[in-house]
Image: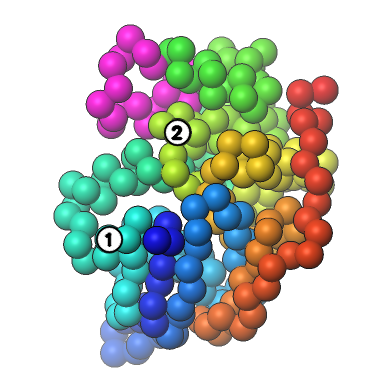
Amino acid sequence: MALIEVKNLEKIYHTDSVETPALIDTSFKIEEGEFVAIMGPSGSGKSTLLHILGFLDEPTGGEYYFNGKPFSGYSQKEIAMVRNKKMGFIFQTFNLLSRTTVLENVKLPLLYSDVKESLWNEMAKKAIESVGLSHRINHLPSQLSGGEKQRVAIARALINNPQVIFADEPTGNLDSKSGQIIMEIIQRLNEKEGKTIILITHETNTAEHAQRIIHMLDGQIDSDKTVGTRRKATDSFTK
């Protein structure tokens, strides 16, 4: 059973009397443990697709199965649970609380979990350590570089040990060196911890960290190819 499966997926946005198709007859499977990059120009449907896969939006037509269960079979309460426990999200804009320390930012998803509060600090510190930021644990976002902010966002995404991580243009606001560090961390999560990664990017060098690249054009899959040799991940962020 595939972790994710979409069949003839469609998404149409309605503005007044105008219909704008964002996804058209999209079908594919993603197995647990895969690292898949979804590429395409602006307006190709890649972000719309990620929002549907991450239960942040609903499809207009077709079918979406997560862990073998159809999207329509999830109640709102179950959707909230899946997003909190099964999915981690990394966004281009970091989405950190500006007046809250690194530790408190990373702990945020635990507020909506059933994990005992007595364990929160230990779990957050472990996640922060995994991205090499233990020395910044009491800093505010304003005291961090862009790359460090994104590493905090990754630690936050990891806090509940999710089954799949969605990364939407995670290097978009970073310089090339910081972006490389972020991609090495994400790749290491796939290779060493077996996390399923779904990456949205328009950058070819970023997509080359994936095992498979789905290219989208005008709301449809233009190509779906396995990467021959992907970039080698290192632990350079800890050096």
Nearest to N terminus: mark 1 or mark 2: 1
Q: Residue at x 54, y 18 (%)?
A: 126
Residue most extreme to the top:
118
Question: Which residue lies at the image location 62% right of the left edge and 33% below the top edge?
Answer: 151
- Mark 1: which secondary structure? strand
Tell me the crowding category of disc 2: few under 14, some 14 to 19, or many 20 or more residues within 10 angstroms, Cα based: some
Callout 2 amino acid: Asn
State the image coordinates of residue 133 (x, y, percent, origin top left): 65, 21
Task: Give the quadrant of the C terminus.
Answer: top right
Residue 108 in which image quadrant: top left
Q: Amino acid at mark 1?
A: Lys
* In the image: residue 125, left or right of residue 56: right
- At label 1, counting other C-alpha atoms closer than 10 Å, the crowd grade (few under 14, some 14-19, many 20 or more) is few
Give the quadrant of residue 141. Answer: top right
Q: Which residues are magenta?
A: 101-120
On residue 69, the disc is 1
